[in-house]
Amino acid sequence: MNELFEPVHKANQSLFETLRRMGDINQKAMDRFMTQQMDLTTSMVDVSMKQLELMTKAKGYQELMSGQADLARDYGQKLLSSYKGSQDIFNELRGSMTQLMDDSVKTAEETVRQATQTSKKAA
């Protein structure tokens, strides 16, 4: 009788392990996204402060416009870098999830194979 329940027990253990690993993968990705978001927020505040300083210290229209163009270019580069970082995180996440699903399918196949053998023995 225990032989009949063993595959179910293994399947449940596998399910919980898969869910735990999925949670770990998601948590790692969220931590990286939050760090990236905080860096972007810090950059926005920094650019705002520099723009305020530029507006108070610029000696003319030309200097103000040149300074704002420099700030916009620098911030644009930070945004592009952040976008590329997000793509890297998503690519890693996709790879990790693909590996997890591949592992889960292999485990499920093995469990089904064992359950089939057990049911044949019981019959």
Image (cartoon, grey):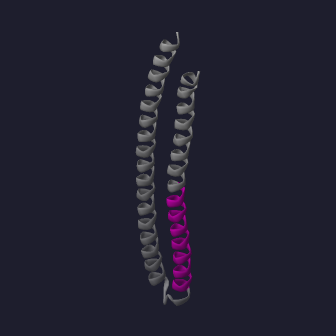
Q: How many marks?
A: 0
Quadrant assignment, res 2: top right
Question: Residue drawn at (56%, 21%), measured in percent from left and top?
Answer: 4
> In the rendering, at what x and y percent does residue 85 appear?
42, 58
Q: Classify 75 as above or below 113.
A: below
Instruction: Depth check: give the residue in front, 9 or 40.
Output: 9
- The majority secondary structure of the magenta stretch comes to helix
Asked whether 49 falls inside the magenta stretch, the response is yes
Q: Classify 58 as above or below 35.
A: below
Question: Residue drawn at (42%, 39%), measured in percent from left and top?
Answer: 98
Instruction: Depth check: give the residue in front, 102 or 61.
Output: 102
Question: Residue drawn at (52%, 90%), measured in percent from left and top?
Answer: 57
Instruction: Depth check: give the residue in front, 17 or 53.
Output: 17
Q: Classify 18 as above or below 115.
A: below
Q: Which residues are magenta?
A: 30-55
The residue at the far front in this view is 1
> In the rendering, at what x and y percent does residue 33 appear?
52, 59
> In the rendering, at what x and y percent does residue 108 appear?
47, 29
Q: Classify 112 as above or below 30.
A: above
Quarter the N terminus occupies: top right
Asked whether 26 falls inside the magenta stretch, the response is no
The residue at the far top in this view is 123
Question: Residue drawn at (41%, 40%), measured in percent from left and top?
Answer: 99
Instruction: Depth check: give the residue in front, 68 or 34.
Output: 34
